[in-house]
Image (cartoon, rainbow, N blue to C red):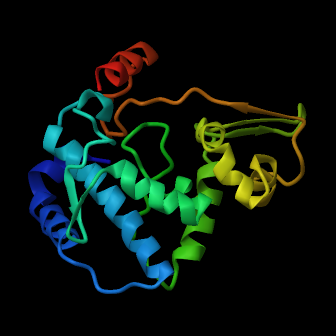
Amino acid sequence: MDYRALASEDRPVLDRYVQQLALPWPQLDPAARKAALINAYNALTIRWVVANYPVESIWRTKKPFSAKRHTVNGAMVSLDDIETELRASDPRIHAALVCAARSCPPLRREPYTASAVDQQLDANMREWLAMTDRNRFDAASGVASVSKIFDWYKKDFDRLGGVPAVLARYGPRPGSWKKIEYQRYHWGLNDTSDIGSRYSDLNFYADKLRN
């Protein structure tokens, strides 16, 4: 994300969208609500970073995920609240929710829609797993080294048959894996600049404790 450009050029557009999210929503079917909540989560995360920019990590801000500071559908919610509802409906949302970290899945360049959300989430899973800076598959050794997200949310992925089944279905290489490893998660800001590149694990633990 180019947060600097967004803050200086397109912030009014983002603000108008956030204001629309705050208004009461019409009755939505499950697919439409899922799409709307993913869009809301990502927009609100970006807006929070923009409000605090420049910052090395979203964790340098005050209670970035747990504070009920956002208004969605007429109610005050946290980013964690939105994520919790989405997790209950579809484990693939872990490939769609972007938490402003360098190790996050990529941010989709189009909104999620009710008619396409299933196809979009499948595409997200495949694109994310194909990113060699976040997931690596070594056919010679039979080792898959994947995002820490698959470790944190193992129980969610059990609903899709477990992490091995998810990697076989969506990963860039077919087949089973002898060993699955989980990579370090880089919480530095996913900015187009290198502002978050030096954000360390020690920084993260200190900020998380503070929050």
Left/right placement of residue 101 relative to residue 149 reads: left
Q: Position of residue 160 (x, y in %)?
A: 73, 60
Q: Residue at x 36, y 24 (%)?
A: 208
Q: Position of residue 1 (x, y in %)?
A: 32, 48
Residue 76 vs 29, above or below: the answer is above
Picture quadrant where residue 183 is located:
top right
Assign the C terminus to one quadrant of the image: top left
Q: Residue at x 23, y 43 (%)?
A: 49
Check the image and name the residue furthest to the front. Answer: 75
Picture quadrant where residue 119 is located:
bottom right
Q: Is residue 198 visible?
A: no
Q: Residue at x 29, y 20 (%)?
A: 210
Q: How many marks?
A: 0
Check the image and name the residue furthest to the top. Answer: 202
Q: Position of residue 204 (x, y in %)?
A: 39, 21
Left/right placement of residue 30 relative to residue 8 reads: right
Left/right placement of residue 128 relative to residue 210 reads: right
Pick whichever, 77 or 148, lies toward us: 77
Q: Is residue 154 visible?
A: yes
Q: Position of residue 29 (x, y in %)?
A: 46, 85
Residue 13 vs 77, above or below: the answer is below
Q: Residue at x 13, y 62 (%)?
A: 15
